[in-house]
Amino acid sequence: MARQIALSFLDRYLYSDRYEPEYIQALCEMTTAFADPSLTACAADALFGIVIESLCDDFEELQTRTYNRVMSQVITFCRHLPAGAALDRRLNQFGLRAEADLLTRIEELRERSDTFAHNLGRPRKVVLLSRVTVGADVAVSSVIVQRLRAALPETDIVLVGSPGLARIFGGCEHVRLVTLDYPRRGGLLARFECWHAVLDAVATEMGPRPDGQVAVIDPDSRLSQLGVLPLTDDRHYFFFNTRAWAAYPPKISMAEMTNHWLDSLLGAPGYAHPKVWLKPAVRNVARQAAAVLRNHGCRRVVAVNLGVGGNSRKRVGPDFEKTLLLSLLQDGRTVVLLDKGAGADEARQTARLLRAVRAKGHPVESRRFGAFEGLTMRGGLVGLRCAIDEVAALIAECDEFIGYDSACQHISAALGVPTYTVFAGSNNPRFVRRWRACGPAASEIIHVDTISHPRLFDEEDIVVRLTDRKPAVPARKTRARPAAKSATPRTAKPKRRTA
């Protein structure tokens, strides 16, 4: 029932331009009506996974306005529950006493996001909110950190987000991490509990007597529910409206868009590619493993990640994945490092792929990161259980990366590795352009229409398109030279392979 209510809400809104508040009210009631948490989770997953995520992913003005309206309604429902007393009290402290107040504030905030009544200046400290997901933190937060450090070398930078930030920012000496848990699953009220922790973290960084020298940057973060929940006085709060469309060139990536916004915020042009800061110990383990493979005759090492972060729409399917791996292994001197992903579902999918490739006669190994003793193959498939920083370290030693739209494509591009991303699950060109990988090396997109019926692709076609975008003769790994800085850099394109 929850799924049908959520889908019907979108039907009426997207195709009839009818906002049905009763549908959102019903979903909110279902998230709090049952003692059984599995039942409340069903309703919360429908509300967030179907309605809210769909509105966020479109990057269209109308959908963004509707997200603001839905979230304002949901927050208002929560604050009137007995368990929402703290939420209500803290919103009242900001003068936000009704649903209309929340909606008016976020609409005005987005409207003036790229025009500043006062610029950032030279604060003694900047508190930057994480985007929560790893890929978005690489594409957006890492760019902000670099630009702030270059423009304001004396300013302290504090990054607030989940504990996983330490795996991609842990090697950065210029950032102090403040970690808290953001629940991406669970009941309705639990998803707003994190806001209290963020408010407390911001208040702590500002101190008992705010002096106006601490600024908060919110890059459309889930920690603030995309700006709907306030964090501090708006005079010290700088909101990056990543879903804006009129103020930015339509074809640029999210990283390039972040640089554009920072040009206005900082009052000077500049550019920074996304970046990850891995700890040296992890890098050394990956470097040694790649050296062993190359010393035993491997000519090419390819990193592959087929995880989709729980979003099955981004996945093409097992037939394509098997065909891709077999194609990569044809020359006999290519080693494919296949990340087993996160969670039981991705582990089962990669296990099936390992069995399928072994059945075709190719050498297959299964290892944990760091357990590389005896890995002397010159060609074959290695399934690896890794944490995200370990995956990143291995990608850094590879000749190329192939995967779905996920955190790993942004990590790969940030590390200067040629990156080939299979985009499925969205037919919105702006979404694909915004979230394409951006870095100093080649980055290519292979868009797969998994939505239209009948399906407009087959597995062989996708593999051929991937192959067509690669250099004809893969070389041993060389370090890409940094690209020249410019306001709107162009992504380098590899030479096309001839038939």
Image (tube, rainbow, N blue to C red):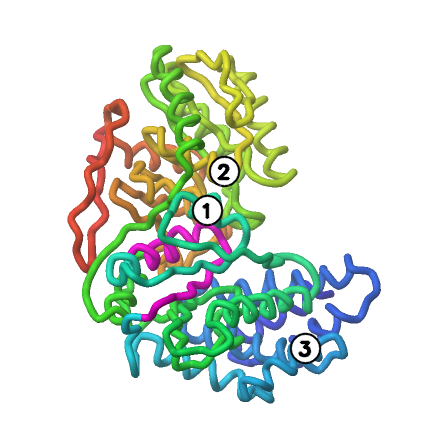
Crowd around label 2: few <14 · some 14–19 · many ≥20 (10 Å): many
Identity of the amino acid at label 2?
Leu
**Residue identified by numbered label 1:** 406
Q: Where does the magenta region start and end?
A: 123-146
The Cα atoms of the two marked residues, 2 and 1, are separated by 9 Å
Crowd around label 3: few <14 · some 14–19 · many ≥20 (10 Å): few
Of tags 2 and 3, the one toward the viewer is: 3
Whether residue 452 can be seen here: no
The Cα atoms of the two marked residues, 2 and 3, are separated by 41 Å
- Left or right: 406 with respect to 494? right
| Tag shown at residue 86 | 3
Taking the spot 70% from the left edge, 76% from the top edge, the residue there is 84
Q: Indicate whether 221 appears above or below 107.
A: above
Identity of the amino acid at label 1?
Ser
Residue 32 percent location from the top left of the image: 76, 70
Say which of 357 and 176 sits in front.
176
Say which of 416 and 214 sits in front.
214
Give residue 21's quadrant in the image: bottom right
| Tag shown at residue 306 | 2
Q: Indicate whether 253 appears above or below 173.
A: below
Of tags 1 and 3, the one toward the viewer is: 3
The Cα atoms of the two marked residues, 1 and 3, are separated by 35 Å
Identity of the amino acid at label 3?
Ala
Residue 359 percent location from the top left of the image: 56, 16
Helix, strand, or loop for circle 2?
A: loop
Helix, strand, or loop for circle 1?
A: loop
Say which of 191 and 243 sits in front.
191
Residue 23 percent location from the top left of the image: 66, 76
Q: Is residue 264 magenta?
A: no
